[in-house]
Image (spheres, grey):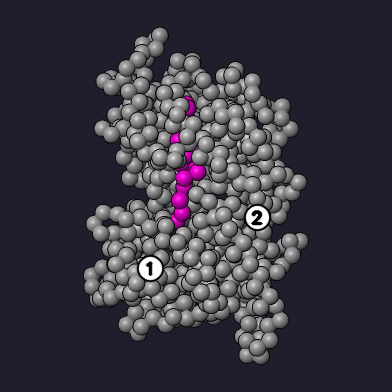
Amino acid sequence: MADLENTESVDAEGVRLPELVLSRAVNALLELQNHDGHWVGELEGDTILSSEYVLCLYFMGWEERDKDEIAQCLNFLRRQQNEKGGFSLYPGGPSDVSASVKAYFVLKLFGDDPEAPHMTMARKRILRLGGIDACNTFTKITLALFGQVEWRECPAVPPELILFPRWFPFNIYEMSSWSRTIVIPISIIWAKKPLRQAPAYASIDELRIPLDLAPDYQKRKVEGTSKSWQLFFSSIDKAAKLAESVTGKLKVRPLRKLAINRAMDWIKDRFEDSDGLGGIFPPIANSLVAFRELGVPEDDPHFRMAERSLKGLRVKGDDNEIRIQPCHSPVWDTAIAVNSLVLAGHDTKDCVKNASRWLLAREVRNHGDWSHKVRDVEPTGWYFEYANEHYPDVDDTIMVMMALKRAEMPEAKPALARAMKWVRAMQSRDGGWGAFDRDNNRQLLTNVPFADHNAMLDPPTSDITARTLEMMGLFGIGLDDPQVPAAIAFIRADQEPEGCWYGRWGVNYIYGTWQVLRGLYEIGCNMNEAWIQRGADWLESIQNPDGGFGESIASYDDPSLKGVGPSTPSQTAWVLMGLAATGRENGTAAHRAVDYLCETQLADGTWEEEFWTGTGFPKVFYLRYYLYRLYFPIAALAMWRDAITGDSNDRESEKRREATI
């Protein structure tokens, strides 16, 4: 173990404890707290967000009004082009054809010379990847708005989908919540087929190439798809387009008006008490396009809210740039910050109290989309964003529950009691928990033609299931609880041959494995069981020479890269927490991980984290959480310290165990 000059205390066996490192990190986190008590870090996504933002402004006719910020978005786009000429889904990743086509079109539309070196490189890379025909559905629909793709080339997304009853196998509430919010406004757009023809100079016909001539084209298989069902739905898609053509000529569409009206009511209802539809960029932008096409005036409250929500996602960067966030993450950031600060045990009571009150005020009290499957339970829970009343999710809810429990807020008890009942009710039949819905795993839906975004479903996952067990353990629930055995069985069945677990909501097997080990520990499992220790063995086996741990996003596409990647503070922290949960806090791997965190801390108490460690949709969309590099190391160093000293004020705390729900 390295000699840590910036440590202050030593335990009975002479082991140095990095208290000064922890103190600096806590102070750095407190400096970032907002005056009303909450934290929010930037949430960075890929260039698709900036491209679509600019195209949305152009479609709305705002290019002159917003020309300065469009120019700054274009500056950001140009800087993000990779060395091969394309645009990636994450730094260091391969070029993505949809991201590259959108960026190329935007740059050309706003005057970049197609023969300029950066445009020539982009065009060559796009053609190698398959060109326009290789793009996904949502990209083709975006291009159709500007006459770059014929609407017949886009899969059918008829608005009549919203009329399908809940007993029908293919209804909107069998889709994931995010797909639902994206698809409903797109269905209006598909039905109306709006067009703002781009100028001739902006045509991207040069990006057409037969797919079999594209040397780097690889059709990405959507998880859960089967050939027979794909053929079936492809036939349905063709039939829907034919019917659309025939009924359009005859001007007879008996359900179209009803469907569009129902879709508009659905969208507007979800604008209430929210940061726009779903609180995320794609539905907000799509809603604006749908509003414009249906003649909603710009002074309409819903129109104004959509525009305000869209503009609220801008981030002003250096060098005269603007980038676009996919959404805001204040509830998530604040809950993790509170958990970390309480674990650290420093004198932060007032800050924790203010943050806890801020969280408590954001409890959901209305029925959302989840209630279509989960009934007879009082509405509650917490969402991810500043406001998103229709879409509380299990992960945010359990993280907030742990924060409020640790903060020891008497006034939070009623909300915590409601939340515990809600979380219990969200357990799926297979024993696991998903994010936003229960039993959202109808694989049939992955075969529809417009489901090529690889995120049509929200099935239970090991990481959320394990975090739910962690929360239950914190509230004094143990192995004898009737819901726990099924959850543990779900997790055990999901273990990889190497001993690790897939991470759905963080990168990747490191995230999944840490969370599983932590959850099993808190619920009271025997951590010496062989299958559990195999998880710890795997974690120790992937340690980097610098003592840290890291895993690239590339492991989602290539599982042979499990646990492989440059060290990052957040992933090192996750591993350290996993090792502490399995009784390996005194091992060489844990001590080297602590050394890594101590040695790489910056003078301001934070850490540098260049590589992204957040997951939106595997293989499709990834995230860089700017606060992951700070509050996760705080939590990890605190857990390791308590495990080393035997002074765990968390799981064994009698004070905490007494007040159970």
Looking at marks 1 and 2 on the same chain, the residue that comes earlier in the sequence is marked by: 1
Instruction: Report the quarter where the C terminus lies.
Output: top right
Magenta stretch prevailing secondary structure? helix
Q: Which residue is under mark 2?
A: 369
Q: Residue at x 49, y 43 (%)?
A: 332
- As helix, strand or loop, the secondary structure at mark 2 comes to helix
Q: Amino acid at mark 1?
A: Val
Q: Amino acid at mark 2?
A: Asp
| Front residue of 355 and 368 | 355
| Front residue of 362 and 573 | 362
- For the question of whether residue 365 can be seen, the reply is yes
Numbered label attached to residue 54? 1
Label 1, label 2: how far apart the Cα atoms are: 30 Å
- Residue 172's quadrant in the figure? bottom right
- For the question of whether residue 498 can be seen, the reply is no
Q: Residue at x 56, y 60 (%)?
A: 271
Across and down, in percent, residue 366 comes to 65, 50
- Specify the segment rendered in magenta: 326-343
Q: Residue at x 50, y 49 (%)?
A: 386
- As helix, strand or loop, the secondary structure at mark 1 comes to helix
Across and down, in percent, residue 364 comes to 61, 46
Numbered label attached to residue 236? none
Across and down, in percent, residue 529 comes to 60, 25
- Residue 204's quadrant in the figure? bottom left
| Relative to 251, residue 57 above or below | above
